Amino acid sequence: MSQTSATQSAAETIGSAQGDLMGLAVLGKTALALGLVIAVIFACSYLLRRLNAGRGRGDRHLKVVTSTAIGQRERVVIVEVEGTWLVLGVGGGQVTTLHELPAPSEPERDESAAVEAQGFAARFATALRANARSSLGRRDNRSGSGEGEQ
C-alpha cells in the first residue's frame, strides 16, 4: 500500500503543479490582453492628436480680450474681430452688442496684471531674489558697523 499511496501523492503533486501552471497561464493571458487594450488606447490617442494638429485654429480672426461676470449667468465680454473691439453682453442664451470701438494698437496693461500673467515659478524667483537682497543688505550693514567699532 505504501507504493500506492506514494503513487497517489506523486499524482496529486503533479496535478496541483499543473493547476498552478494553468492559473499562471490564465493570469498571463489576462495581463497580455490588458496590455493590448491599453496599447490600442494610447495609439488611438496619438492618432487623434496628430490628426487634429494639422487642422490649425479656425478662429484666428476672433480673440477674446477680456471677460467679466455681471451676475450668475450674465457676462460682459470684449472680443477683437479684425481690428475692432466688440463689447458684448452675454446671458440668458442671448448675445447682445453693447458697444463697438477700434482696437488699440497695444492693449493697456497695468503692473498688477503683468505680475498675475507671470507663472508661479517667475513670481517665486522674484520673491526669493528680493528676500536674498534684503537679508544680504542687513548682513553687510552689520559687518560694516562691526568693523568701525574695532
Image: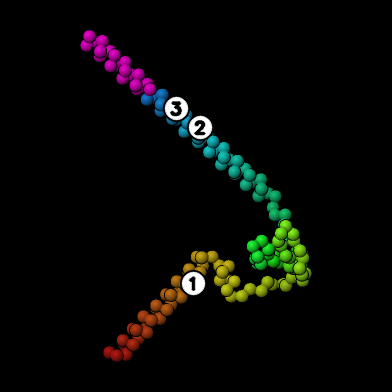
Q: What kind of element bears circle 1?
A: helix
Position of the C terminus by quadrant: bottom left
- Marking on residue 33: 2
Can residue 80 be seen here? The reply is no
Across and down, in percent, residue 89 comes to 72, 65
Q: Earlier in the sequence, mark 1 or mark 3?
A: 3
Can residue 9 be seen here? The reply is yes
* Residue at x 31% of width, y 20% of height: 13
Q: Residue furthest bottom?
A: 149
Question: Looking at the picture, does residue 146 appear above or below residue 33?
Answer: below
Q: What kind of element bears circle 3?
A: helix
Q: Quadrant of residue 91?
A: bottom right
* Residue at x 57% of width, y 37% of height: 40
- Using a 10 Å C-alpha cutoff, classify the residue at mark 3 as few (fewer than 14 neighbours), some (14 to 19) or many (20 or more): few
* Amino acid at dot 3: Val
- Marking on residue 26: 3
* Amino acid at dot 2: Ala
Across and down, in percent, residue 28 comes to 44, 30
Q: Earlier in the sequence, mark 2 or mark 1?
A: 2
- Using a 10 Å C-alpha cutoff, classify the residue at mark 1 as few (fewer than 14 neighbours), some (14 to 19) or many (20 or more): few
Q: Quadrant of residue 94?
A: bottom right
Q: Which residue is mark 1?
A: 126
| Residue span colored magenta | 1-19
Q: CA distance from mark 2 to mark 1?
A: 51 Å
Across and down, in percent, residue 104 comes to 72, 72
